Amino acid sequence: MANPLSRTVMVTGSSRGLGLEIVRQLAVADNPPKVIIATCRNPDKATELQALARDHQQIKVIKFDVVDYKSLPSVVEEVKAAVGSLGLNLLVNNAGIMEKCSTQMFGVPLQDLEPQMFRNVLETNTIAPLMLIKALLPQLRVAAAATSGPAGAPRAMVVNISSIMASMGTFLDRHGIYAYRSSKTALNMVTKILAEDPEMKGLLFVAIHPGWVRTDMGTTVAPLRAEDSVSQMLRVVANINEKQNGVLLNYDGSVLPW
Ligand SMILES: NC(=O)c1ccc[n+]([C@@H]2O[C@H](COP(=O)([O-])OP(=O)(O)OC[C@H]3O[C@@H](n4cnc5c(N)ncnc54)[C@H](OP(=O)(O)O)[C@@H]3O)[C@@H](O)[C@H]2O)c1
């Protein structure tokens, strides 16, 4: 990424799936970020991430369960120590969950959906990313102030990994999946509110749909490989400009309706 965003990056949920692949592709890029903070809730079990971190010294693995808000102050301190005076140029809110049951591939039928299932999904997919953004605003602002780049290129930004299943305008014909789809729609609104907030001047916020990808969440029947989804998303992110603040992008760079 020949872009100011190639300086310091943080990715949540990096133990597997898209998060792990984002970290891997950033680390092996021609012009890799100076610091890649890869967070996961169980570093001891994240063996692929740990192997990657051994090979690429710019990867710093931090233990972080995104819904453990009490840990935020210490996570922020670890981020500060890792990025130093550069601040944080790019936060990727990737960690996410979907409600599950044994009778269907995605989601839970309404008759089996319990309030706590919905709350858990909303907590991880919507509230946690917003609380992390709030905690990291000072670091994002440091990066925005410290970075120079081409006119219109963002100096610090947040990418919220969303889903086309949350697009009310597209409304894919997938029945059920009440909690997941609603939580990502709420994440989209969070993205838009932040993008329009005058207090966030200098920062850029976008939501991205990674495509339907072969991961534990996407399942083996998904058409896209994680490698292909991530390479396209990273190209899109590297070329984002300020005019795209507050949009929902597809992984190929096209704009999706909210
Ligand atoms: N795959 C798709 O087709 C698809 C489509 C649209 C959007 N997405 C979105 O893309 C993102 C990544 O999905 P994926 O397909 O890579 O899913 P995945 O393979 O199921 O991986 C999910 C990742 O999120 C982490 N995670 C979950 N809850 C967490 C928590 N409380 N704290 C920290 N980490 C947590 C998991 O960590 P553990 O290993 O500790 O469980 C794991 O690293 C999600 O936001 C998902 O909604 C995926």
Image (cartoon, rainbow, N blue to C red):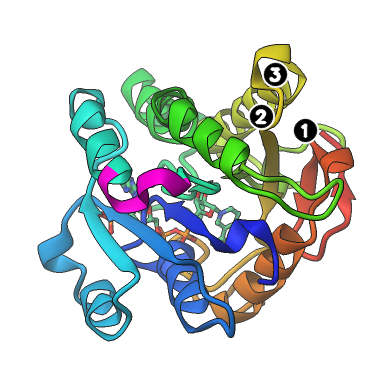
Q: Secondary structure at mark 3?
A: helix
Q: Is residue 43 above or below residue 189?
A: below
123 or 60: which is nearer to us?
60
The reply to whether the residue tagged 2 has its Cβ within 8 angstroms of ligand 1 is no
Which residue corresponds to the image point at 56% horizontal and 39% vertical from the top-left? 177
Tell me: 159 left or right of 75.
right
Callout 1 touching callout 2 (CB < 8 Å): yes
> Looking at numbered disc 2 in the image, what kind of residue is underneath it?
Thr
Q: Is residue 176 visible?
A: no
Q: Amino acid at mark 3?
A: Ile
Query: Does residue 82 show up?
Result: yes
Determine which residue is flagged by label 1. Answer: 246
Q: Amino acid at mark 1?
A: Gly
Which quarter is ligand 1 in? bottom left
The residue positioned 35% from the left and 70% from the top of the image is 58
Q: Which residues are magenta?
A: 81-86
Main secondary structure type of the part rendered in magenta: helix
- SS assignment at label 2: helix
Point out the residue furthest to the left here.
Answer: 44
Q: Are marks 3 and 2 in contact (CB under 8 Å)?
A: yes
